[in-house]
Image (spheres, helix red, strand yellow):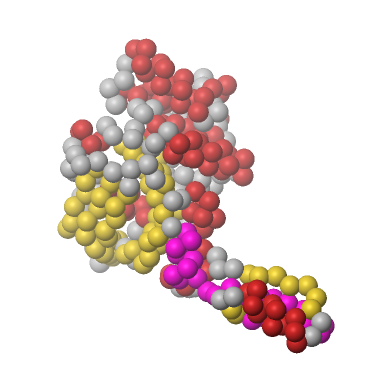
Amino acid sequence: MLTLQDVHKRYGSITALDGLSLEIRRGEIFGLLGPNGAGKTTTVNVAVGLLAPDRGSVSIAGLGSPRAPAARRRMGVAPQALALYETLSGEQNLRFFGRIYGLAGRKLAERVDWALDFVALAERRRDAVRTYSGGMKRRLNLAAALIHDPELILLDEPTAGVDPQSRNSIYENILALKRQGRTILYTTHYIEEAERMCDRVAVMDRGKVLALDSVPGLLAAHGARAVLVAEVSGETVRVETDDPMAELQRLAASGPLGRFRVEHATLEQVFLNLTGRELRD
């Protein structure tokens, strides 16, 4: 559905994308996980044609460049920076964006109604966006990306700065879109989001993909070994092991066994192993 091949992008002396290659499959939620400055937003901007790559190519659904009108009609974008007109109502925003995509008349009215219902904003449709909470604005931002019923949806940090209720609502919206067969590119630095939402995840940093797989695949390839934590003869021991049950039996034979637990590898460990632990500003 979306292919980026050997894409390079620089801003002066800063390399934002350094030979990035990705292939997003139809119908999947594909996560881009990376720290601040990893190149996630630049990837989205190149993918939708807002930025031209210095080198490399981007193709949408076999239709060629995202700058081609036929390709642009197939995709919707919810940018990290809210793309809304605060003096207009929620309904007026959606009607405006719908008209940009060529919707009119009954079709436009139907899509506006659907989008407002989908993001649970129908009751606030006539209120100015400036009166919306942060979570409501994020949900309307998503609705604007969906107004023309796109097949490919690009979401750049779609839950940034929202309350837990709105975040959970957005999660449910995205999973509903997947069930409808939509393809979703989802950028985030929230590890729990990637773990919960994505079929495959690319961990990227400094404009490159460091690893790409399903979450279980990433854990197997880049996570730490399991750690068995057990009380043996009144003392707590920690043992790294590939076979926690066999290790537990060995410990039980060595003395009285109390409480025990197994700590498995996490996506956070994979993320830190690949991108490092230094602070990013």
Please say if 65 is above or below 277.
above
- Picture coordinates of residue 42 (x, y %)? 32, 53
The reply, left or right, for residue 212 in relation to residue 60 is right
Quadrant (top left, top right, bottom left, bottom right) of the N terminus: top left
Q: Residue furthest top?
A: 106
Residue 121: percent from left, percent from top: 54, 27
Residue 152 falls in image quadrant: top left
At horizontal 29% and vertical 55% (from top left) the residue drawn is 22
As drawn, 165 above or below 30: above
Toward the viewer: 53 or 87? 53
Span shown in magenta: 215-239
* On screen, residue 179 above or below 47: above
| Nearer to me, 69 or 185 | 185
Residue 183 or 81: which is nearer the viewer? 183
Q: Is residue 158 visible?
A: yes
Apparent side of residue 267 relative to residue 209 in the rendered image (left or right):
right
Q: Is residue 9 left or right of residue 80?
A: left
- Judge whether residue 210 is colored magenta: no
Position of the C terminus, as image quadrant, is bottom left
Instruction: Locate residue 60, reporting x and y percent.
Output: 24, 42
Residue 141 showing in the rendered view: no
